[in-house]
Amino acid sequence: MPRVVPHDPKDDAILLTAIGGKAERLATRDQHFFHPDVLKIAASYGVRIITDDALLAELRAHGP
C-alpha cells in the first residue's frame, strides 16, 4: 500500500478507502489528514477533508 499520510501510516488505509470509494468528503478530527500534502492528494481525487463540525454545519445548511 502506498504511503500517503505522513506521521501515521495507519491513516493511509482510511484515505485510500475514501478515494477508492469516490467519497466527496472525509470528516475527521485527526490532524494528520490536514497535512498540506494529504489535502492536495485528496483534492486531486475530489475528496474534501473537513472536520466533523464542518460536516454537520454543511448538512444543517442543506436542511432536511
Image (tube, rainbow, N blue to C red):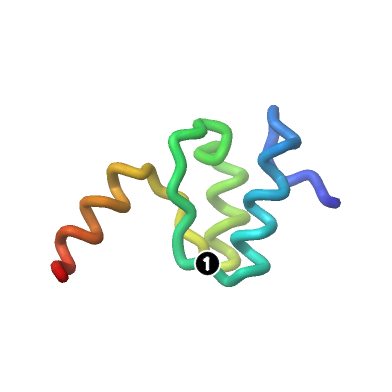
Q: Taking 52 as reference, is 31 above or below it?
A: above
Q: Nearer the viewer, residue 26 or 64?
A: 64
Q: Residue at 69% of width from left, 34% of height from top?
A: 6
Q: Position of residue 12 (x, y in %)?
A: 71, 45
Horizontal arrangement in the rendering, residue 31 relative to residue 8 (left or right): left
Q: Nearer the viewer, residue 44 or 33?
A: 33
Tag 1's secondary structure?
Answer: loop
Q: Residue at 15% of width from left, 62% of height from top?
A: 61
Q: Position of residue 8 (x, y in %)?
A: 70, 31
Query: Which amino acid type is shown beneath numbered disc 1?
Result: Ala
Horizontal arrangement in the rendering, residue 7 relative to residue 22 (left or right): right
To which residue does mark 1 refer? 23
Q: Nearer the viewer, residue 40 or 46?
A: 46
Horizontal arrangement in the rendering, residue 56 relative to residue 62 (left or right): right
Q: Residue 42 sits in which quadrant?
A: bottom right
Q: Residue 35 sits in which quadrant?
A: top right
Q: Residue 62 sits in which quadrant?
A: bottom left
Q: Residue at 63% of width from left, 52% of height from top?
A: 15
Q: Position of residue 5 (x, y in %)?
A: 68, 40
Q: Position of residue 22 (x, y in %)?
A: 58, 71
Q: Taking 60 as reference, is 20 above or below it?
A: below
The single residue placed furthest to the top in the displayed view is 7
Q: Taking 58 as reference, is 23 above or below it?
A: below
Q: Residue at 26% of width from left, 51% of height from top?
A: 56
Horizontal arrangement in the rendering, residue 59 relative to residue 30 (left or right): left
The single residue placed furthest to the front in the displayed view is 64
The single residue placed furthest to the right in the displayed view is 1
